[in-house]
Each structure stands twice: as structure tokens, then as C-alpha cells.
Image (cartoon, helix red, strand yellow):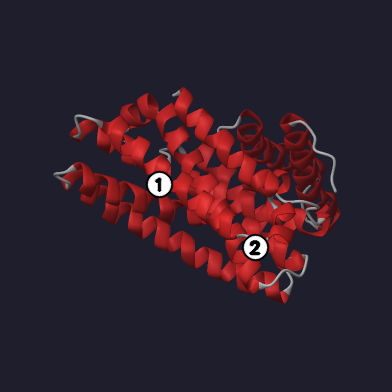
Amino acid sequence: MRTECKTSEITTKLIDRYRSMIGRGIDRLSYTPLSENEKERYVHMTRLSTENLTEKWRTGRKTLRTEIAYRGLTDYPESKLDASLLLDAVINLLDDVYDEAMGKDEMSLYIVELISAISKMSTLFSEEDRDTVEAYFQKILVIAFSELLLRDRIAESSSHEERLSHVTRCYAIKSMDMDAFIELPLRAKGFDEESVSRWVELGRVHRAISIIVKDLDDLEHDRRVGEQTPVVILCQGSDAPCMVLDDCVKHFEEEAENVWMLMPEEQRTIGENLYAMIGSAVELYEEN
């Protein structure tokens, strides 16, 4: 069993691994028609683009989903780290491109990093991995569509029960962006689909509560830039937004407890850390 490191040590390890992986592409510049001066400028730009992303991982401004899985799953297979980190990079970059208003120079950093990450993905994913990732990107499209749909439904809700239903559904759908990061390592370890699905459910619960916590932390920023998260919408149109969120978190807690209770004893060691991390996420919510 892996000895658990401090979170900061794990974050540093994963960021260094990602930087090294992206940096190996720069070493192939001898095959390009760039002059030495142009090559130096290119290297500087690619390093800036990588730093733009990894600094957000380091400070927690963007979620490093690979770290959640690495911390949560026993004996995470190192062979899947590079593929997971690349997928993490692509999803984080696409999320910012979709959500954030940015100038041309800043956008260029995101495009450079996206191309760098995507160019490496084809060599790292097995056939089974590719099926997992294809299904994952379909889920990302569903998330984007559902967010727009459910925002309106939350805003138009006229009762606590109706708001709770739409908010819970919204965060449940958003939490699917954790799925592949649980599936890739567990399938590599040979677990059957029933076992994988149980841990995917727990990964979603942790992710859903974590998104709620982040939305609360970012409330003032999101209001200022016009980002319509469920928390922002609740605070605009509900006299008791905290009651809705409290009941929403309680729903996810109970869901995790139900999955855990039905989990065969011999499988609990696979992700007992992940289950404990759900409790920590609830504690963070209660501190808000």
C-alpha cells in the first residue's frame, strides 16, 4: 500500500511529472525550421503556457482531479498517471476557455498548452482507455448542455423542494467530470465494471460537494464577473439559499453512506481514503 504523502507533496509530484512530460516535446525542436532566436522565444512561450496551468493547480484555483484519485485510491497504478494528467490538463484548459473572458495574448497560452497536451494523448491511451475517454468527453458535453438548462430551472423554481431538486441534479451532473479519473486507474488494475461503478459513485459525491464548496468560496468573484453558478442563482432568488445547499449536501452524504454500506468488505480497502475524503469535504462545507 502506498504511504500517504502530504497533499502539497503529492501536488508537487504530479505537477513536476506533468512539466517533465510536456517539456520532452520541447526537446524535439531540433527538427523544426526555427532559428536559434526563434527557438528561444518558442521555448519561453511554451514554458509560460505550462506555468499558467500548473500554477493554478498548485494554488488550488483549478482542480487537479488526478490528485483526488491518487490520494483516494489504494495502490494507484503509476502507469496511468501521465494519461490522467494530460486529460486533467485538457479539461481544465477547456473549462477556462469556455468560462473566462480573456484577451488574445492570454488565450494564446491556453491554445498552446491545449495543443501540447492533445498531441501527447494518442501515444498514452490504450484501446480501453480511448473508450473510457470517448465516453468521458460525451459526459462533458452533457454537463455543458445541462448547466444552461438547469440554471433557468433553478431561477424559475417557486418552492424549496423544487429548488433543491434542480440544484441537486445540477451538481450531480457536474460531478461526472470526475468519472474517467476514477475509471482509468481501476480498470488498469483489473476491477470489474460493477466495482468500478461503485467507486465512480463515491468519486462523484466527493466532487459534487467539492464543487459546492468552491462555488461558495467564489461567490463574490462569480457575482462580479456574471458567472451564473447554482449558488449565485440561489442567492439572487431565494430567501434561504443555505437551507437548499444544506439539504443538497445531506443528500450526497446519504448517497455515499448507502454506497459504502452495500460495498463488499473486501473492496473497501480500494478506496477507503476516498470515502474519508468525502467526510473532509463535508467539513469544509460546514466551515463556510
User: Percent position (x, y) of residue 229?
Assistant: 34, 40
Q: Earlier in the sequence, mark 1 or mark 2?
A: 2
* Figure check: 235 above or below 122: above
Residue at image mark 2: 183
Q: What residue appears at the point 63 percent right and 72 percent down from the top-left corner? A: 193
Picture quadrant of residue 183: bottom right
User: Percent position (x, y) of residue 114?
Assistant: 61, 52
Q: Please, what secondary structure does the residue beneath circle 1 have?
A: helix
Left or right: where 156 falls relative to 169: left
User: Percent position (x, y) of residue 50?
Assistant: 68, 40
Query: For the residue marked with disc 1, what is the amino acid?
Result: His
Q: What residue appears at the point 76 percent right and 53 percent down from the top-left corner? A: 81
Q: Please, what secondary structure does the residue beneath circle 2 have?
A: helix
Residue at image mark 1: 251
* Figure check: 195 above or below 57: below
* Figure check: 9 above or below 143: above
Picture quadrant of residue 32: bottom right
